[in-house]
Amino acid sequence: MKMRFRAGCVAAMLAGLALSGPVLAEDRDPDKSLPGQKDAQSDITITDTSMQFIKGENRMTGVYFTIANNGGNAHLMTDVRSSACRTLVGHHSDQESTPGTLSLFTHLSLPAHTTLVFPRGGYHLLCLDPDASVQPGQDVSFTFSFLGGSSKSVAIKLDQAQPAP
């Protein structure tokens, strides 16, 4: 008897679920769920920029910069692009490259009122297979993108290569 009662309850619950309407997720406006993200470019400054061929090769350049978040909200860098670079990846001069290092600039947190420095000898961007038309002395355009859809473009001068140590 107990078995029939349980089977009947389970059947009734399944029938109730089948007859109920679909459940829809709430449609949220991304700007409302991410307060302060819409205008990240007004909080962010990118200074002390430089770019140079590494070890005299013309197949990769190091891109160095300081980025500051002067605003009251944390921001997330989601991408860096340049039409002059076939590929841009994160790199550290003295450490082994890992998937986390290579994709560092696709999910970099910029806390409020914080300055981060990406110098020679530390974490920085690598521009792999740069456009052959880009020569020392020219400005190269880079666009930094942030969560919420804003971006900031900067021109970085390609310097002469420094001799290998």
Image: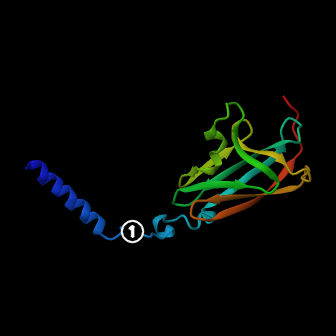
Name the residue: 74% across, 50% down: 48
Q: Residue at x 72, y 42 (%)?
A: 119
In this rendering, the answer to whether 81 lies above or below 64 is below
Mark 1, residues whose alpha carbon is within 10 Å: few (<14), some, or many (≥20)?
few
Helix, strand or loop under label 1 = loop
In percent of width and height, residue 110 lies at 57, 52
- Amino acid type at image mark 1: Leu
Against 145, is 120 above or below? Answer: above
29 horizontally vs 126: left or right? left
Residue at 57% x, 60% y is 147
Residue 120 lies, in percent from the top left, at 74, 39
Quarter where residue 58 is shown: top right
- The residue lying toward the viewer, choosing from 85 and 159, is 85
Q: Position of residue 83 (x, y in %)?
A: 80, 57
State how many labels appear: 1
User: Going by the picture, which residue comes out furthest to the left?
Assistant: 1
Extreme-top residue of the structure? 165
Residue 52 lies, with reference to residue 95, above or below; the image says below
Q: Is residue 138 left or right of residue 35?
A: right
Could you tell me residue 9's position as x and y percent? 16, 57
- Which residue position is annotated with label 1? 24
Coloring applied to the structure: rainbow
Quadrant position of the C terminus in the picture: top right
The answer to whether residue 120 is left or right of residue 24 is right
Name which residue lies at 76% across and 51% down: 49
